[in-house]
Image: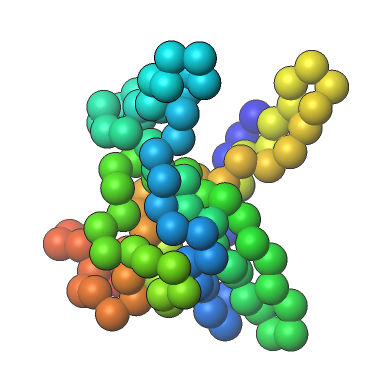
């Protein structure tokens, strides 16, 4: 199914609600999930997305550990996408970002200042 881009500029704030943690691919062996393209460990971060008077917490996957991201910290998110999924009668939306960084940090070189 197609990934749907999310315009993070529409949010009034994005805050780390759950600190980054590596995603586990196999619970029995403890093997960590690895990004197919980069070979980096995939981390999951709980983000509070605020828009006006509402807020939602979503788990967002990102390849590589988001350096400096801590609980309660405002963050910038680059290239956030939502991908609907269905498996054995279960369904949901998976969120993934190219980068999650502390809001006060400068944008990655050559990546632009995308929020």
Res. 58 visible in picture: yes
Count up the numbered dots: 0
Which of the 4 image quadrants contains residue 34?
top left
Q: Give whichever of 17, 74 is nearer the camera.
A: 17
The image position of residue 9, as x and y in percent, is 51, 74
Along the horizontal axis of the image, is 75 left or right of 1? Answer: left
- As drawn, 48 above or below 83: below
Along the horizontal axis of the image, is 63 left or right of 4? Answer: left
Res. 78 visible in picture: no
Q: Give whichever of 34, 114 is nearer the camera.
A: 34
Q: Give whichever of 35, 21 is nearer the camera.
A: 21
Colour mapping: rainbow
- As drawn, 42 above or below 104: above
Q: Residue at x 28, y 80 (%)?
A: 104
Along the horizontal axis of the image, is 71 left or right of 69? Answer: right
Q: Tell me the quarter of the image containing the N terminus.
A: top right
The image position of residue 93, as x and y in percent, is 68, 42
Q: Farthest residue to the right: give it.
A: 89
Q: Tell me the quarter of the image containing the C terminus.
A: bottom left
The image position of residue 59, as x and y in percent, is 57, 50
The image position of residue 80, as x and y in percent, is 49, 54
Q: Residue at x 41, y 52 (%)?
A: 20
Q: Residue at x 66, y 78 (%)?
A: 51
Which of the 4 image quadrants contains residue 55?
bottom right
Q: Residue at x 41, y 46 (%)?
A: 21
Along the horizontal axis of the image, is 76 left or right of 28? Answer: left
């Amino acid at each position: 199914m197609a990934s749907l881009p999310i315009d993070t500029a529409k949010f009034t704030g994005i805050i780390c609600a759950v600190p980054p943690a590596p995603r586990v691919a196999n619970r029995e062996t403890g093997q960590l999930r690895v990004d197919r393209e980069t070979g980096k460990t995939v981390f999951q971060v709980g983000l509070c997305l605020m828009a006006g008077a509402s807020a939602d917490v979503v788990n967002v996957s990102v390849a590589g550990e988001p350096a400096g991201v801590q609980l309660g910290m405002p963050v910038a998110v680059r290239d956030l996408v939502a991908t609907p999924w269905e498996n054995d009668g279960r369904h949901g939306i998976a969120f993934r970002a190219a980068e999650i960084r502390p809001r006060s940090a400068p944008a990655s070189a050559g990546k632009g200042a995308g929020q």
